Image (cartoon, rainbow, N blue to C red):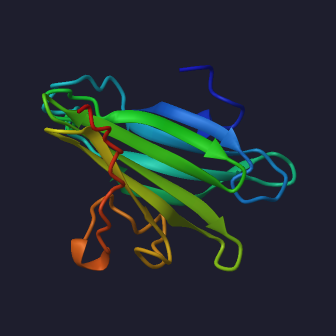
């Protein structure tokens, strides 16, 4: 991981390290903010002690003087280091853009799964809300298929702080993924 930006080290608690971080204007105020993931120091795959520990995802906003302050925290969205199945480390990517961020996981063994959660800043509430979720799984016939779910179409307002990365299927409208066109080779 690249050198930590100014002010981030002070936000890392003792016994923890930064797994990933990204900088962007997360609340659209023109200042560079941070989103980052914390894990226990020295975590390695298949370590039953540290590898199963929860990891936190944190949002820190910069004030007019550039000082960072933690404004959002989630202990349940980032999967543990051993939670990827045979492919132990499920963390795939952390992205940030103006007004939001995305967390992606990938795992499994012969049959793979994926999930991606995109959050966007809601100026009225001052919160980051789940904007889209992508859930993928391998199929025998068509490879890795991904279903996309969107706020106001498939689910309501889900705050970043409250989201635990689990889907209550009764709250989602399941829409069949688009089928690829097949050409007849007659």
Q: Is residue 128 left or right of residue 57?
A: right
Q: Residue 22 sits in which quadrant?
A: top right
Residue reaching furthest to the front:
186
Tell me residue 32's x, y (percent): 77, 44
Q: Residue 34 sits in which quadrant?
A: top right
Q: Residue at x 52, y 50 (%)?
A: 58
Q: Residue at x 31, y 36 (%)?
A: 106
Frontmost residue, 181 versus 122? 181
In this figure, what is the number of numbered marks? 0
Tell me residue 24's x, y (percent): 71, 44
Q: Is residue 116 left or right of residue 126?
A: left
Frontmost residue, 109 versus 2? 109
Whether residue 12 is visible: no
Q: Quadrant of the C terminus?
A: top left
Whether residue 76 is visible: yes
Q: Is residue 84 left or right of residue 96?
A: left
Q: Residue 17 sits in which quadrant?
A: top left
Q: Residue at x 60, y 33 (%)?
A: 9
Tell me residue 26's x, y (percent): 69, 53
Q: Is residue 129 left or right of residue 176?
A: right
Q: In the picture shown, does residue 80 fall above or below 172?
A: above
Q: In the picture shown, does residue 64 fall above or below 81?
A: below
Tell me residue 182's x, y (percent): 31, 41
């Amino acid at each position: 991981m690249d050198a930590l930006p100014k002010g981030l080290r002070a936000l890392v608690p003792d016994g923890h390290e930064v797994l990933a971080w990204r900088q962007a204007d997360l609340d659209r105020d023109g200042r560079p903010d941070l989103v980052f993931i914390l894990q226990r120091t020295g975590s390695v795959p298949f370590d039953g002690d540290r590898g199963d520990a929860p990891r936190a995802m944190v949002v820190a906003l910069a004030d007019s003087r550039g000082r960072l302050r933690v404004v959002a925290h989630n202990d349940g969205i980032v999967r543990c280091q051993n939670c990827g199945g045979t492919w132990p480390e499920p963390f795939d990517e952390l992205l940030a853009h103006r007004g939001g961020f995305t967390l992606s996981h990938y795992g499994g063994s012969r049959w793979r799964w994926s999930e991606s959660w995109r959050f966007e800043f809601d100026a009225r509430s001052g919160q980051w809300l789940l904007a889209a979720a992508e859930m993928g799984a391998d199929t025998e016939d068509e490879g890795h298929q991904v279903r996309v779910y969107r706020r106001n179409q498939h689910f309501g307002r889900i705050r970043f702080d409250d989201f635990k990365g689990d889907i209550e299927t009764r709250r989602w409208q399941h829409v069949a993924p688009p089928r690829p066109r097949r050409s007849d080779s007659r």
